[in-house]
Image (spheres, rainbow, N blue to C red):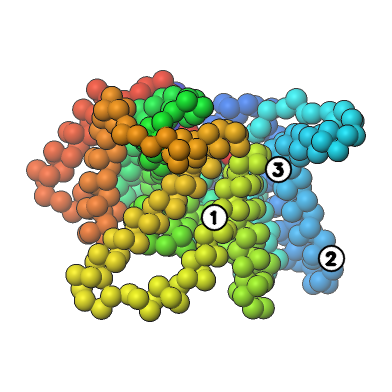
Amino acid sequence: MLFNTFHFMYFFVIVFALYWASSFRFQNLLILCAGYYFYACWDPRFLALLILSTAMDYGCGIAVDRIEEPRRRKLFLILSMALNLGMLGYFKYFNFFAESLQSLLDRSGVHVSIDRLNVALPIGISFYTFQSMSYVIDVYRREIKPTRNLIQFAAFVSFFPHLVAGPIMRPTTLLPQIERPRTFDLHQFYQGVYLIFWGLVKKVVVADNLAPIVNDLFGRSATIDGGSALLAVYAFAFQIYCDFSGYTDTARGIAKCLGFELALNFNLPYFATSPRDFWARWHISLSTWLRDYVYISLGGNRGGKAKLYRNLMLTMVIGGLWHGAAWTFVLWGFYQGLILIGHRVLEPYLARIRPTDSIDRGAWKLARIVATFHLVCFGWLIFRAESTTQLSNMIHAIVDRPAIPAAATLLPIAICIIPILIIQMIQYITRDMIFIFRAPWYARSVFYAACFYAFVLGGEFGGGRFIYFQF
């Protein structure tokens, strides 16, 4: 069930009405039932996996808290991780590793047939397994106490606004909201409606109009010229941003309408001044999850620079593989690790040449934003490529066949991107992600009218899937 469909609209109107007409105890049960229905609409067969993960981590959380003996406590932690990572590995990575091993054996002259699994990838499995697993880890670290209420815990895992594409919510932030009563707040509701509307505009008007252009340009990678290849990369940078941030804005808005606050997942990432700053602004819930549960577990910045760089690289490669079972994602993760390490190495030298004059500092900051954006865009080229051959073709086009892009290609991309850039520049200058709420009534009226007409006249209403649903 997609947010950008009438099916979801009918579903949410019914849930919203029943939710605020119900008592606190029934509200949590309704959240749980709504989450299971929402997930079953994709494929009811995989609902059993969600229930299994929930039941196992609920039990493991209680066991880890009750048991004092370290080895037995760790055993239940390992059990939780084995189940969640085992499900993830079986459904998402088995065929990838099987095909990679088959290819390696063939090149070595060993001809062995390795069977593949004929199973679909359960939607959202990367998100809900990480969220459920982090609960047991936090209990094991004694950072939280486990909940004894199974309904509340199951509602935490299956909370439908963010169930299939995040943000990945920590038990320390979402679970307490589920455990305490909620009251209807009109101001919070208005903010929620705004986020839903703005998120759908970014998805339906911008991302879904850029998608066919990006698909066409990448599909012609063998013959494309350099100018068009660059346009394809820039267009995809804004397609994936508007697609994913549009989803999380909508998810946050739906949650607000129900009295919940979900974490901010995007904070103007294309205004980052370094690769490190980018990951503090892009998919924040995943980057902080990887930091807290992978990078720090590996040792973080303890043990010298060599171990620091190793831990950064391993964390980003794991992050790349989390996004998809393909070597291009592994390569993307390696590239992200490389530029993070490169920034760490250069940071002391960059600090020395930072200008002191205010005007020069502004120019220096702008230069860093532009440089970081293009480093990120090269990463998006790796990320979007469907194969290493397509990636190589696009790079060769940019390097070997430079050209001025055709106006017929440039114009529709510019029409989609420029309004988003203007809005983001205002957000960046005002440091206010919902500045429109503080704007005069006539400015809000113009903004809402423009978005409405763009939505109605320029929206793609085919119910296009969100990019991150495949992860």
Residue type, numbered disc 3: Leu
Query: Looking at the picture, how far across and down is residue 451, in whole percent?
Result: 23, 34
Q: Residue 142 appears in which quarter of the rendering?
A: bottom right
Residue 204, by quadrant, is: top left
Expressed as whole percent of the image width and height from the top left, the position of residue 39 reads: 58, 33
Q: In the picture provided, is 248 more to the left or to the right than 271?
A: right
Quick check: marks 1 and 3 in contact, CB under 8 Å? no
What kind of element bears circle 3? Answer: helix
* Nearest the eye: 269 or 82: 269
Label 2, label 1: how far apart the Cα atoms are:
37 Å
Alpha carbons under labels 1 and 3: distance apart: 23 Å
Query: For the residue marked with disc 1, what is the amino acid?
Result: Gln
Residue 57 falls left or right of residue 343: right
32 versus 209 height, above or below: below
- The disc labelled 2 sits on which kind of residue? Arg
Q: Which residue: 41% across, 31% down?
A: 225
Work out which residue is located at the far front of the displayed protein and give it: 400
Q: Which sits in the foreground, 5 or 458? A: 458
Q: Which residue is mark 2?
A: 72
Q: What's the CA distance linking mark 2 and mark 3? A: 24 Å
Expressed as whole percent of the image width and height from the top left, the position of residue 359 reads 19, 70
